[in-house]
Image: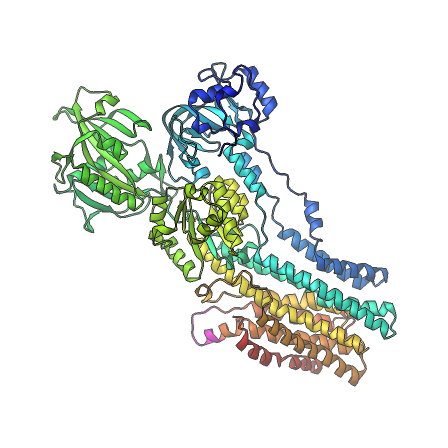
Amino acid sequence: MKVEKKMTANTIATNNFTQTTKDLLNYEWHTLSTQEVVQTLTSHSQAGLSDEEAIARHERMGANQLTSKAGKSPWLRFIEQFNQPLLYILLAAGVVTLLLQDWIDAGVIFGVTLINVIIGYIQESKAEGAIAALSQAVTTEATVIRDGQKTRLASTELVVGDLVVLASGDKVPADLRLLSVRGLQVDESALTGESVPVEKATASLAGDTPLAERSNMAYAGSFITFGQAQGIVVAIADATETGRISELIASSSDLKTPLTRNIDKFSKTLLYVILGLAALTFAVGLGQGESWIDVFKATVALVVSAIPEGLPVIVTVTLAIGVSRMARRNAIIRKLPAVETLGSTTVICSDKTGTLTENQMTVQQIYAGGQHYTVSGIGYAPDGEILINQQPVDFNTDEHIAVWESLAAGLLCNDSHIEWRDGQWNLVGTPTEGALITTAYKAGLTPENLEQELPRIDTIPFESEFQYMATLHQLNAKRRLNTIYLKGSVEAILQRCDSMLDAQGQQIALNPTAIEQEVADMAKQGLRVLALAKKEVSSHKHSLDHDDLNQGLVFLGLQGIIDPPRAEAIAAVQACQSAGIQVKTITGDHALTAAAIARQMGICSAEEGVFTGKQLAQMDEQEFAQAAEQGTVFARVAPEQKLRLVKALQLKGEIVAMTGDGVNDAPALKQADIGVAMGLAGAEVAKESADMLLTDDNFAAIEAAVEEGRGVYRNLRKAIAFLLPINVGESMTILIAIFLATALPILPIQILWLNMVSSVGLIAPLAFEPKSGQVMQQPPRNPREKLLSGSLLQRIFAISVFNWLVIFGVFQWILQTTGNEALARTMAINGLVAAEVFYLLSISQFLPSLVARIQGKRQSIAYAPAIGIVVVGFLQCLFSQWSIMNQVFNTTPLTLIQALICIGIGLPVVLVALILQRFDPLN
C-alpha cells in the first residue's frame, strides 16, 4: 500500500490515542520497526492495551467486522422483471384490450406477460452474498493480551493496538504487525496465491515490498500452519487487506454477457420497428374509414405477432440444458447467461495452483553423491520410482547409498505424515514435508521402520532466522554415536558443511561449485530446492542447540520440489489453443515457478511473456494494456492488479474467463465476463463472486464447459432462425391485410397460441440438439458479431416470406372458395404449423443422426425434434377439433382431407431450407 503522507511515531501523543481508522491507512506498517509500531499505536509490547482503552477504541472505531452489502428484496427483483421494452408494449395492448371488454384476449395477453416475468425472475441470480461470505470467512476467536493477561475474545471485539497471540491452527483475526515469532509459518494462499506456507520474521522491510513478500505481517483470514507468534493489530474491519478486497468486489461491475447485450440491442431495435409499424397500421386503417376500435384490434394483432414471446422461454431452456450438460462434466453454472458466454470466450486467465497443477507438492529431482536422479509419480500417493538414467534404482547394491541417506534424512527430519483416508492419500502437515515423505516411500522407506531404528531424541523446529530444521536420533549401541539430520535452505545448510557423500556413501571433500550449479539448474525449472545434511555426535548427546550445527556437517543431497501440472490440464490447454482461445496464467506464486509450469503446459515458450506484480506496478496505463495483451504469465500479482488485467483485456474487446480459488481472486472473478471458482478448494467469497464452479478444481473442466458453451450458442442461433420467421411472417400477413382492407387472416389470440404453444413446442427440441464434433476446431466467434448476422437475416427473410405465403394464401383461397372465415383461419394456422414442422426437420440433427444410425455408424439419435412434433401435433388436434378450443380461439374442426391439404402446403419449405443451407449452414 502506498503512503500518501509520511508519518512517524512522533506525530501523536503517546499517552492519548486519537487516530482514526482512516488515519491508520496512511502507514506502511511493514516498514516500521516493532518499537515504532507499538509507540504509534500507543500500546505495550508485553501487556497490550488496558480494558478501558480497548472499550474506548471499540466505541470510536467500531467492530472488527466487514461491512455487508444489502441485497434487493424479492419483490423488487420481481418488479424489475417488468422493466423490458417489449413487455411495455404487451402490457399497454392488454390494458386497452381490457378497456374494450375483450376479456379472453386481454387475459391471454396478460398471461403471456406474466409467464415472461416469472421466467426472468427465476433467471435472476441470488442476491449477491460475496461480502457477507467474506465477513463470515474472517469471523473467529482470538487470544489477546490485555492488562498483561491472556484472554479469548471474538474477533469482532478486537481493536487497533491489541496484542494478539498466535499458535498453530489459528486463523489470523485482523491485520497484524508481528512483534515476535518462533518458527512461524502462515498459509496465505487465499489472499496472495502463494502455494506453500510462508515463513515469517519481524525485521522491517522496504516500502515497495509486495504484499506476498511482507514477512513481518500476518493478514486477516490467513491460517497459522506452524509455530507461534505475537503481533499487534494495525488494521480491523474494512481497513484490512481482506476488507480492501471486499471494496474491490463491491466496485466491480456486473458485466452483461454477449448474449444479453445482443438480446437487449435486438429488443430495442424491435421496439422501434414495432412502434413504427403500429403507428403506420393505425394511420392506414383510419385513413381507410375503419372504426378506431377495429383498427386498434388490428394494430394489437400486429403488435402481438411481431413480439417473439417465445424467445425468453427458448433462451432459458437452451441455457438450462447447457447447465445440465456442463454439470455432468464437472462445471456447475450459477448464472444462466454464463453458459453462452463460455462459448464466445477468447481469453482464459487461469490461476496456477490447483487448477493447472495438482496442488500437491512433489519431488521430481534429487542430487546426491554427485549423481542426478529423477522421481516418477505425482502427488502424495506413494506410487512411483527413483530413477537414474531412466532406469529404476536398485537400493540393494552399494551404488546409491548417498541418495538413500538423503531420502532417510527427509523422512526423519519431518513433523508431517501421510495417511490413507476416504479412498485417497491425504497429507497431515506441510506440503513440502509431505513431498519428502512420499519420495522416501517410493524408495521403500517407511516412518515406522526408520523411527524404530533411529528414534528421535530432540528437535529444533524450523525458524526463519536460521532457515533449517534439525532432529537428533539415537543410533544402535554398536556404533555408540547419535545422528543429527538437517533439512533447510541450500544457503543455510551448505555453509555448515565441510564434506559430502559420494554415491557409495564415502565421505569426500565438499564441492560447492557443483552443488550450486545443480541448484541453479533446478531453480530454472521452477523447482523449490531443499538441502539435506547430517552430523554424527556422541551417544551421550541428548539435546540439541544451534551451536551444535555451526560446522562439521556432511552434505547428503538436494531434493527439487514442485507442484506439477495436471496431465489432463495440459491436453485441455492445447485444445483451447486449437480453438483459438488464449490461455494466460495469473498467480501469486514466484515468477520462475509460474513460468516453468507455463512452459511445461505450452502456455508460453520464452521469458518475454512473463511479468511480475512489481513490474506491472511501475507501468503506465498504455504499458499495462500492452503487457496484458502480450503477456502469458503474471506472477506475484496483487488483487487489484488481477482486476486491472481483466479490465485491460476487456477494453481490448476480449471475452475473459477468469479462474481463482482465493479471497484475492474474488474482485477479478466478479469483473470477468465469466468467473470460474474452485468448488473443492475455493474460498466461499470466491464461489459467491463466480458464475461457474468447478467440482473437481480442474482446468480440463473449463475446456469442456467452453465446448458445451459453443454448442449452446449454435442451438440458440438455430432457435432464432426458427422463431423469428414465424413472427415476421405473421406481421407481414397482418400488415398486408390492413393495406388491402381485407379480413385479418389470423386473430390476436390465435397469434398468441402460435407464438407461445405451437412454436415453443417445436423450438424447444433445438435446445437438446447435440453439439457438433468440430465445435472446438474453429476460432471463437467475434465478440462484436451481431446476433442477427447478414446470412442469418437472409435466412429469416426467406422463410418469413414462405410463412406469409402460407398464411395469407391459404386464408384467401379457403375464404374465397367457402366463405367461412373460421375455417380459413384454422387451415391457415395449421398450414403454418405444418411448415414449421418440416422446417424443424430440415435444420435439426434428427434426420442426419437417424440416417447415420441406419448406416451402422455409432451415433446416438437426436430424438428431441420427433418428440416435439408429436406433442405439437396432439395440441393442434385439440386446437382444431375440440369444441372448447374452437370457442376460445374461434376455430373450427377440419376433415381428414383438409388436414392433409394443410400438411401438403407446408412441405415445400424443405426445398427452401436446403437452398439456404448452402449459404448459411446452421449445423
Q: Is residue 56 above or below residue 277?
A: above
Q: Nearer the viewer, residue 183 or 382?
A: 183
Q: Which residues are magenta?
A: 851-859
Q: Nearer the viewer, residue 392 or 523?
A: 523
**856 within the magenta span:** yes
Q: Position of residue 371 (x, y in %)?
A: 17, 44
Q: Is residue 681 above or below residue 119?
A: above
Q: Quadrant of residue 552?
A: top left
Q: Nearer the viewer, residue 130 or 427?
A: 130
Taking the view exactly as shown, the residue that stands out farthest to the bottom is 817
- Give the color scheme: rainbow, by chain, secondary structure or one colour: rainbow
The number of numbered badges drawn on the structure is: 0
Q: Position of residue 415 (x, y in %)?
A: 31, 31
**392 within the magenta span:** no
Query: Residue at the location (54% across, 47% down)?
Result: 671
Q: Is residue 34 left or right of residue 923?
A: left
Query: Residue at the location (59% across, 72% down)?
Result: 840
Q: Nearer the viewer, residue 282 or 564?
A: 282
Q: Quadrant of residue 467?
A: top left
Q: Position of residue 438 (x, y in %)?
A: 29, 40
